[in-house]
Image: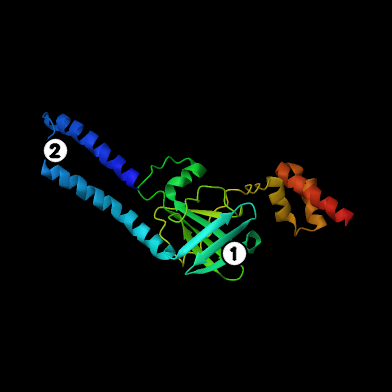
Amino acid sequence: MLFDNLKVVGLMIVVLPVYYKWKNGTDFVLEDFWIWFIIGFTIITNIPAVILYLNYYFENRNTEFTLDYEQLKISITKDGVKKEYQKNEIEKSTYHLGIYYKNAVDRAGRIPMLISDFGYWDIQFKNGDRYYLTNILHDFLHQTPLLLKTRYRFRIYPYINKKDNRKGINLFEEPKKEKTLTEKFIEQYQSKNERQLREILDNKKSYQKEAVEAAEILMKRKNVG
């Protein structure tokens, strides 16, 4: 976050003099007004990031965790109590990331913000234990997750919301194959009897090719049965 602030301030220091000279025709002088303007701008633009940091800090101030990718387990210490969980004990796993990182999915060209790198892991185990592990503990959210079924939520403001149970998307599962038109007709014609299917076959010109194919498949199934 500090590096991002330096980039913003540096950009302002470079852009302001150029813009000022283009607008007024005179050289830019860094007066007290501009110093306070830059300070005020920096403070205001950092308020969302500070709120997120405090939100994460108070959630994880007495928490530590380690991921063991070799033994496929996670160790979590909260309030001095250490627990170890195996990968197969995970009931639900969701990564909450800034909306900027959704560019990797839809290539929408979003620009990074000062809060873009904040994120947390909502992990729930089969015994009911649930944790919200943030990336102020470890910067782990951009690595391959311990559980490949981990879902991803991309949010403009990834504040920890414990009541939010909406599902994310799984980036590691293959997208479901869309049904063909023939398959859709098969589902639609399941309830038709042989006479109705025969009517379709006897009047092929009145029906789509896929509808006829579906009727033929269903007739074969009925005859085999």
Element type where label 1 sits in the image: strand
Q: Residue at x 37, y 57 (%)?
A: 53
Locate residue 172 relative to residue 122 in the image: left or right: right
Mark 2, Cα crowd under 10 Å, few <14 / some 14-19 / many 20+, is: few
Quadrant that contains the C terminus: bottom right
Mark 1, Cα crowd under 10 Å, few <14 / some 14-19 / many 20+, is: few
Name the N-terminal-most of marks 1 and 2.
Answer: 2
Residue type beneath disc 1: Glu
Locate residue 50 relative to residue 70 in the image: left or right: left
Residue type beneath disc 2: Leu
Q: Does 40 appear above or below 160?
A: above
Residue 20 location in percent, x, y? Answer: 16, 34
Q: Nearer the viewer, residue 12 or 24?
A: 12
Q: Residue at x 25, y 52 (%)?
A: 44
Q: Does 25 appear above or below 140?
A: above
Q: Residue at x 65, y 61 (%)?
A: 88
Q: Nearer the viewer, residue 97 or 5?
A: 5
Mark 1 and 2 residues: CB-CB less than 8 Å, in contact?
no
Residue under pointer 2: 30
Residue under pointer 1: 84
Tell me the quarter of the picture where residue 68 sits: bottom right
Identity of the residue furthest to the front in this view: 80
Residue 2 location in percent, x, y? Answer: 33, 47
Element type where label 2 sits in the image: loop
Q: Residue at x 47, y 43 (%)?
A: 103
Residue 187 location in percent, x, y? Answer: 71, 55
